[in-house]
Image: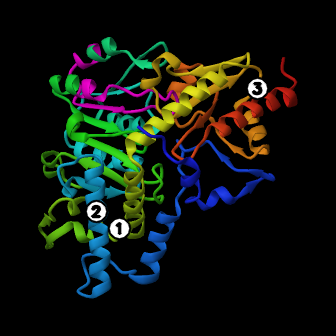
Amino acid sequence: MPAINVEGIRKDFPIFNKKVNGKELVFLDSASTSQKPRQVIDAVNDYYENYNSNIHRGLYYISAKSTDAYIRSKELAAKFINAESYKNIVYCRNTTDAINIISLSYAEPRIKSGDRILITDMEHHSNIVPWLMLAKRKKAFLDHVSLKDKSFIDIDDFKSKLAMKPKIVAFTHASNVLGTINDVKLMTRLAHEAGATVIVDCAQSAPHMKVDVRDMDCDFMAFSSHKMLGPSGIGVLYGKEERLEETTPAIVGSDMIRSVSFNTVEWNELPWKFESGTPNIEGAIGFGAAIEYINKIGIEKIRDHEVGLLKYALKRLSEPSGITIHGPGYDSINSRGGAISFDIKGAHPHDVSTIFDSEGIAIRAGHHCAMPLVNGVLEEDAVSRMSFYLYNKQEEVDKAIDAIDKVRRVLRLK
């Protein structure tokens, strides 16, 4: 499969014309948020300049155009993850919002005192806190699956915890810290066999690799626009039709209602049943443009490109002494997504990030909203992380390695 044209792609991103501290911007923080191509920016501007209006409610031209563009975005999102229909696609603010909607709307009335909810040690706070709060409200138990080699889900422990019959099982497809790609198809099958409803966090996978919800067979899934070239403030909650139909919305009002009186309410059809008030119309339109951009390049080619960068980066990071790399190693490259967390012996990650920034290089430092993993499993206060996407190139990895040398010089490390 031919490589993608990185230099051509970079020309679509206005931000790469920017200098940081007099240096060419090297953006290695796409696991946090991605940069936006001109095509997405133009789509949002076009909406505001030419057909800004509310959806569904207007019997006039620009409202109809806005509605059509909004629905088309959902159709693109549905096809992108191989959902059955755009009716399975509920727009919300982001992955965090989607998981909260599932917790409050679907799980809240189904979890009783003494029930169990199961997550894993590698979850982002967004897939921990909603379940923790639900467990506290309902006097339920929140269990968590341990990791093998501080990198992979311990499937034996997973099976052991499933034997305790949790009602909800929620886990990430790809870790934002370790980069680990989990076998979600296997985990979903095992959870279903145990009688659980399955929620998968695809925030770190959907932008980077093929995600097929029908093959995965999850009940619910969530991902965010802003991590895959689209605008902030819009995300996807996917649900199987039967799960969405049997769910009563917890946040209510406006277009999600078919009819209402002072005594009764009848919900709208899917997916509008879960979208209260005026939605993020411009975000949806920009998100649709982002999906079209990714489709034009090809998600498989993007994945191949990132694997090449990962191989190169893991080799280069193994050259200096005193570097600890977290997550799957080079021999497990196909089980790793585009994020590499690392430590430099004797250097605090915040100092590392600051020195990298002096070279125009943006990396992340901290607990990455995964404190049980970073502080507990990895036993670190914080870690440094570089993460890749379709617009990164090998020369940027070289600049990162040069920045590590600068860290050693500035901090006078041996």
Residue shown at 73% from the left, 16% from the top: 321
The answer to which of 372 and 226 lies nearer the viewer is: 226
For marks 2 and 3 on the same chain, the one whose residue lies earlier in the sequence: 2
Taking the spot 41% from the left edge, 35% from the top edge, the residue there is 128
* Residue type beneath disc 3: Ala
Residue tagged by mark 3?
Answer: 347
Q: Considering the numbered disc 3 on the image, is that residue within a helix, a strand or a loop?
A: loop
Viewer can see residue 122: yes
Residue range in magenta is: 160-188
Relative to residue 61, is residue 309 drawn left or right? right
Q: Please, is residue 410 above or below residue 102 in the view? A: above
**In the image, farthest residue toward the front:** 2
The image quarter in which residue 271 lies: bottom left
Position in image of residue 273 (x %, y %): 20, 61
**Residue named by callout 1:** 279
Say what amino acid the circle numbered 2 marks. Answer: Glu
Instruction: Determine which residue is flagged by label 2.
Output: 275
Say if 282 sits above or below 63 in the image: above
In which quarter of the view is residue 156 placed? top left
Q: Which image quarter is the N terminus in?
A: top left
The mark closer to the camera, 2 or 3, is: 3
Pick the front one: 381 or 383: 383
Furthest-bottom residue in this view: 60
At mark 1, the secondary structure is loop
Q: Are marks 1 and 2 in contact (CB under 8 Å)?
A: yes
The amino acid type found where label 1 is placed reads Pro
Q: Is residue 185 left or right of residue 31?
A: left
Q: For the residues marked 3 and 1, what is the alpha-carbon distance in whole angstroms?
A: 45 Å
Magenta residue check for 182: yes
